[in-house]
Structures are given as C-alpha cells and as structure tokens.
C-alpha cells in the first residue's frame, strides 16, 4: 500500500477543473485487506475517507480533506463465468480496459455511456448511463458487488445476499462504503448499426416518441441558437461489420469533433458575440453516416474538449416540453451557448437512488467549455428541470439539497436509513453528501 499526497501542493482537482480538494493523505491500497486497514486507521485518526477514480464528476462527490483512496491497484478482470454470463472486475478498473478485455473474450456489456475513461466504481456510484429504450444504466447491469464499510468489514451483496444493500449500493454515491469489486451481466458480443444524421430540431421534437419507440438506442444533440440537431440511432445488426474507415473516423471524430470544435470554443470564449454564427457552422459540420461495429466502438467516442456539465433526468413524457422551454430561455435571455445540448433516455429501474428509479426517464444535459462562466445558463436550465420534478445526475453540477431530493425520490428515506446503519459516524461524509443526503 502506498501513501502520498495529491498533485501540486497536495491539491487534487477533477477533470473539469471546477473542483479542488486538499486531502490529509492519499492511499493506494493493493488489496481489500489494505483498504480495510486504511479505513480503520482513518477512524483512529478522526478522518473521513473518500475514494476517487479518474475525477470525471463535476460535483464534489469525491472531494475530501481526510483520506483520499486511489483504487488503481484494485483493478483487472477477476473472473469470467460463461455459464452465468457474468464478469467480475476490481473497482479501479477503467471502463475502457473492461470493454477491451470483454471484446477479446467475445463478450460485451449490454449498454454503456459515451465515454469510457472512468473507473467502474466511479461510473456506477454516480449513475453513469448511456441511452436505451429497454437497456438501462451501467449500474442496472450489476449482478453483485463487494464493499468495505465504515468499520472496516467487507460486505458482499446481490439480489439474494444482503438485497437491501444491493438495491442501494449499485448507485451508492460513496455514502455506504467503498466498492472493491463488481460483477456485471454480460452477453456474447454483438454488432450495432449506427445511423447518424442531421435533423431539424422541430422535427425531432415532433417525432420524439416515434424515434424513441423505433430504435433500441436513440439520442440527439441540439445546437443552441440554431434549429439543427445531430441524431444518432443505434440498433442491433446481423452484420456484416462495417466500421468507419480510419481516415474518415479521424477527420470526423478527432479533427472536426475535437480539434476544430476546440478552436471554435476558444474563439467563442474570447468573443461571445460570435457564438451564434459558430453554432450555425458547427451544426452543419458533420454529415450523415452509417456504420456497423461492436458495441463499445459505437456507444463511445473520444472527448478531448474539457467542459463543465449539468444533467437532469425528467420524466420521459415531459422531455419535449422541457426542451421547448429551454430553447425559449436561450432565445430570450441573451445567453450565448457554445456547446450542444445532449438528450438521451433510459427505462425505469429498481435502484434506490438511480435517476431512473421507478420511472421512464429522459436525460437533458447542458454544457459550457472549461473556463467559461456557466452559472447563469445552468441556473436558468435548472429552474426548468426542477419544475418538471427533475433529478440531477449525481456527478454533474447542480444545486439541489436533501429537502428537494427527498421529494423527487420516493425511496430516499430507505437510502438514508441504510446509510445510518452502515455509516453511523459518517466516515464517508463530505460537504456534498451532507448537502444531498442531510447530516
């Protein structure tokens, strides 16, 4: 086990650059036993404990002035069970490593988000998701997990073993314990055909229910200040495999979507008045394309332009109205928004504090490039989201507290009661959890 301090002058920062913390010490345990010892030692020293993965959350969910746990040594594939069709991995395993390893074994997750830099434990703890008509978040694919609780004991849970913990810990916010191992459901690798094409914003809104119903995975990006969107429909395919040609992929996914887009963000940041014109150009930069490939090569894409993000889950039936209200606010407010608005969906699930818990959901995400003032835009968007009983993504910027969240999560009290039982002394507490869960 190694113990160090974080970053320059002992400061840890997240990927988006909007959260910083100075932990008292940093620990990278090489085993579950070492992790349990670190938790017990923190208790002896009167320190709180927080694990952190790759820092892709925009909230301070992982920030601590106590002991910062780095899980990178608790990583790798532990077991593949082809009879049960599950894979067990260490909590510090990055999603990209998991996806590559599964592909080599001819296996795949059913659904995933659009980036794969996060650790599996960080991704599930904050509710990372993709888009799907019937397939839910990454956490919804969990069959079992192991965590170290506040007294240093190791707890395993599944639908049959400690089921009340399993219901909550799949998206546990780091409040119930430190996840050490996760077992995911997998299936034989399959092909997806992706159809990406521009579509007028008004047409997407008019046809939203139809587009959702006709496609296994539907999402779109709306470019504020324009009437344009870029849509993506992913559906299972019998093949043949037909990936994006290497040169075309580099031009569209690296040069245009990252390189040119980054330059456009720099220009917009320096001269905000140019943003509407840039948006009109950006909305026309990508042409329609269709390709067929294995899941992670379709679901995920490189994100090299750093940004800050707010995302809310609203009832799917409210999505169109919310988007119309958001467009009206942008048009009337004088806000200059340089980043597209991302829209995805998920089916209802049974995870206690999942943003899709108990209801079919639509996710609406607003972004601003790193270093750009975002408060006015996010505040305006959040007013709309909360008026529709929106649930904020646990790892993305929001201002909601326990009073509000207890109203939009029917099982909120179930989660906090379990937290009282597993962590009565608040060993895993920090300012963020104090705000969203209460003292």
Image: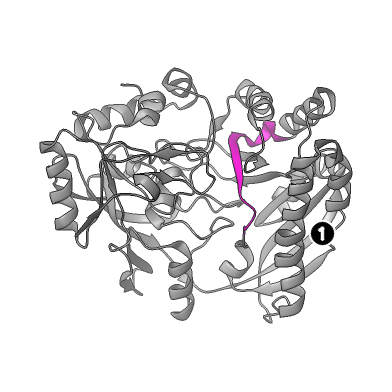
Is the residue 333 above or below the residue 299 in the image?
above
Residue at the far top: name it: 403
The segment highlighted magenta reads 303-319
- Relative to 254, 86 lies left or right: left
Q: Quadrant of residue 328?
A: top right
Is the residue 262 above or below the residue 85 in the image?
above
Circle 1: element type: strand
In this view, the residue in front, 325 or 92, is 92
Place of residue 363 in the rendered image (x, y in percent of width and height, measured from the top left): 62, 40
Instruction: Look at the image and tell me in which quarter the N terminus lies.
Output: bottom left
Can residue 15 be seen here?
A: yes
In this view, the residue in front, 282 or 270, is 270
Place of residue 381 in the rendered image (x, y in percent of width and height, measured from the top left): 67, 28
Q: Does the magenta stretch include residue 311?
A: yes
Q: Which residue is drawn at 85% across and 58% down?
A: 285
Place of residue 253 in the rendered image (x, y in percent of width and height, measured from the top left): 71, 65
- Relative to 361, 66 lies left or right: left
Q: Quadrant of residue 181?
A: bottom left
Place of residue 315 in the rendered image (x, y in percent of width and height, measured from the top left): 61, 33
Q: Residue at x 41, y 57 (%)?
A: 119
- Relative to 340, 105 lies left or right: left
Q: Mark 1 points at which residue?
A: 197
């Amino acid at each position: 086990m190694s113990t160090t301090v974080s970053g320059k002058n002992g400061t840890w920062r997240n990927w988006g650059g909007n959260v910083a913390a100075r932990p008292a010490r940093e620990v990278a345990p090489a085993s579950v036993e070492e992790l349990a010892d670190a938790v017990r030692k923190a208790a002896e020293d009167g320190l709180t404990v927080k694990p952190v993965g790759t820092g892709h959350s925009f909230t301070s969910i992982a920030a601590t002035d106590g002991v910062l746990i780095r899980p990178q040594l608790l990583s790798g594939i532990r077991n593949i069970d082809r009879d049960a069709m599950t894979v067990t991995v260490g909590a510090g395993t990055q999603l990209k490593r998991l996806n590559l390893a599964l592909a080599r074994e001819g296996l795949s997750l059913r659904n995933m988000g659009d980036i794969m830099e996060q650790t599996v434990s960080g991704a599930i703890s904050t509710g990372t998701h993709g888009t799907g008509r019937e397939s839910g978040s990454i956490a919804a694919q969990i069959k079992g997990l192991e965590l170290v609780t506040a007294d240093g004991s190791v707890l395993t849970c599944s639908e049959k073993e400690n089921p009340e913990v399993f219901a909550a810990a799949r998206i546990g916010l780091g409040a119930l314990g430190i996840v050490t191992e996760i077992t995911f459901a997998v299936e034989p690798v399959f092909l997806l055909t992706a159809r990406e094409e521009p579509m007028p914003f008004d047409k997407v809104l008019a046809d939203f229910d139809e587009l959702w119903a006709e496609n296994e995975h539907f999402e779109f990006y709306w470019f504020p200040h324009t009437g344009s969107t870029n849509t993506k429909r992913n559906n299972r395919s019998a093949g043949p495999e037909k990936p994006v040609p290497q040169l075309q992929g580099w031009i569209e996914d690296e040069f245009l979507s990252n390189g040119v887009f980054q330059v456009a963000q720099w220009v917009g940041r320096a001269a905000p008045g140019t943003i509407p014109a840039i948006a009109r150009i950006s909305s026309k930069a990508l042409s329609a394309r269709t390709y067929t490939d294995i899941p992670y090569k379709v679901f995920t894409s490189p994100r090299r332009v750093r940004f800050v993000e707010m995302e809310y889950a609203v009832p799917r039936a409210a999505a169109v109205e919310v988007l119309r209200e958001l467009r009206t606010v942008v048009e009337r407010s004088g806000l200059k928004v340089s980043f597209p608005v991302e829209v995805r969906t998920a089916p209802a699930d049974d995870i206690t504090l999942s943003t899709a818990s108990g209801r079919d959901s639509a996710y609406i995400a607003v972004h601003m490039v790193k270093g750009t003032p975002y408060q006015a835009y996010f505040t305006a968007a959040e007013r709309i989201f909360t008026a529709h009983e929106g649930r904020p993504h646990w790892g993305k910027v929001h201002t909601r507290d326990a009073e509000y969240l207890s109203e939009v999560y029917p099982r909120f009290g179930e989660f906090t009661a379990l937290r009282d039982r597993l962590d009565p002394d608040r060993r895993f507490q920090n300012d963020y959890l104090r705000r969203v869960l209460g003292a």
